[in-house]
Image (tube, rainbow, N blue to C red):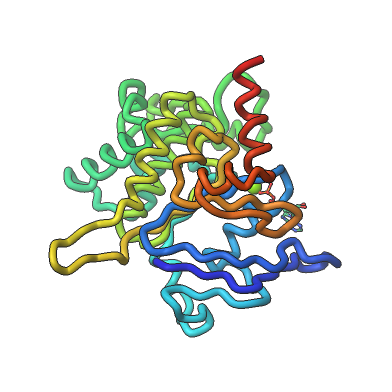
Amino acid sequence: MKIQAQNLTFKYPGESTPTLKDINLTIEPGESLAIVGYNGSGKTTLLKVLIGLYDHGGRLLVNDVPTQYFYDGQLHRRTTACFQEYSKHFLSLRDNVALGRTTSDKAGDSRIVEALSRAEGKSILEKVDLDTVLNPHGVGSEALSEELQQEQDEMNKRMGSNVKSLSLGQWQKVSLARGFVASEQADLVVFDEPSASLDPSAEKALFSKIRSLSAKRDAGDDKEIGSTTTIYISHRFSTVRNADKIAVVENGTVLEHGSHDNLMERNGRYRELFEISREGYVD
Ligand SMILES: Nc1ncnc2c1ncn2[C@@H]1O[C@H](COP(=O)(O)OP(=O)(O)OP(=O)(O)O)[C@@H](O)[C@H]1O
Ligand SMILES: [Mg+2]
């Protein structure tokens, strides 16, 4: 999917100043774009506007067609998103990953296992199986409200003892696996800080899988350039640097964009942030 933003602006309802202004950006089909920038600079908002979740000013074109010419839901069906606040459901691992998108048979289960493996989460299956009900509230460490305690007791009664809790990183992998199941039919896949709870080795493998979603598919004579475009927000420069393009967002606008090499040469904010991230390892 090709995405173009032309003088894009966006204001949250009730706010007096725009959160995004003068955004100009082109992402070619099959490209990967990384978005970086300070907390609160507008990265998540930009991602949501780019996938058509919010009404905006300026123009947004998908495959050279202004988005207002698509009918409701047409773009959303071709888009998969994993957001910072992902949802955890008091459901089986199978249902947490598939959310109704696969069949409940062997073929469906193998897609779920494949998606977990792409999300670096296959080892979760050493602890729980696809039928295990996942407790979104965790157990033990925090006192549960009366209502949550009742919900948990009810699930325990219904499911026997097959209710387990996962760590934060494991939940993140479940949510990513959900994204990978959905990405099978998507031309645009977006991830908002997908690796915040992942260990470095899982993170490295995850980003190479995310980028491979964007690898241009070459179908012989019939060269298919309409392959999956990926956009991800990350604070980790070790992975950001490998994106085809990087956009630095600051105060609601794109301050710089280009490849890692272009931006390093430019000697601007990207280089500054990149060097700060490296100093962290040297000190
Ligand atoms: N629903 C909302 N209503 C009003 N303002 C909002 C809303 N969501 C975010 N904002 C504001 O918009 C600005 C950009 O927020 P956004 O979440 O896009 O930042 P971000 O770059 O993703 O930050 P982070 O790195 O912390 O995730 C912030 O000033 C924030 O307070
Ligand atoms: Mg954000």
Q: Tell me: residue 153, above or below residue 55.
A: above
* Residue closest to the eye, 117 or 101: 117
Kindly indicate the quadrant of the structure image that contains residue 25.
bottom right
Kindly indicate the quadrant of the structure image that contains residue 116.
top left
Q: How many marks?
A: 0
Q: Is residue 115 left or right of residue 197?
A: left
Quadrant the N terminus occupies = bottom left
Residue 83 can be seen in this image: no
Q: Residue furthest top?
A: 283
Residue found at x 55% / y 37%: 151
Residue found at x 33% / y 46%: 212
- State the image coordinates of residue 172 (x, y, percent, origin top left): 48, 36
Q: Is residue 147 left or right of residue 223?
A: right
Q: Tell me: residue 242, above or below residue 74.
A: above
Residue 14 can be seen in this image: yes
* Residue closest to the eye, 163 or 46: 46
Q: Residue furthest left?
A: 221
- State the image coordinates of residue 242 (x, y, percent, origin top left): 45, 41
Quadrant the C terminus occupies = top right
Residue found at x 35% / y 52%: 214
Q: Tell me: residue 193, above or below residue 222.
A: above
* Residue closest to the eye, 18 or 241: 241
Q: Residue furthest bottom?
A: 69
Q: Residue furthest front?
A: 265
Q: Is residue 35 left or right of residue 62?
A: right
Kindly indicate the quadrant of the structure image that contains residue 227.
bottom left
Q: Is residue 3 left or right of residue 251?
A: left
- State the image coordinates of residue 199 (x, y, percent, origin top left): 48, 24
Residue found at x 50% / y 49%: 259
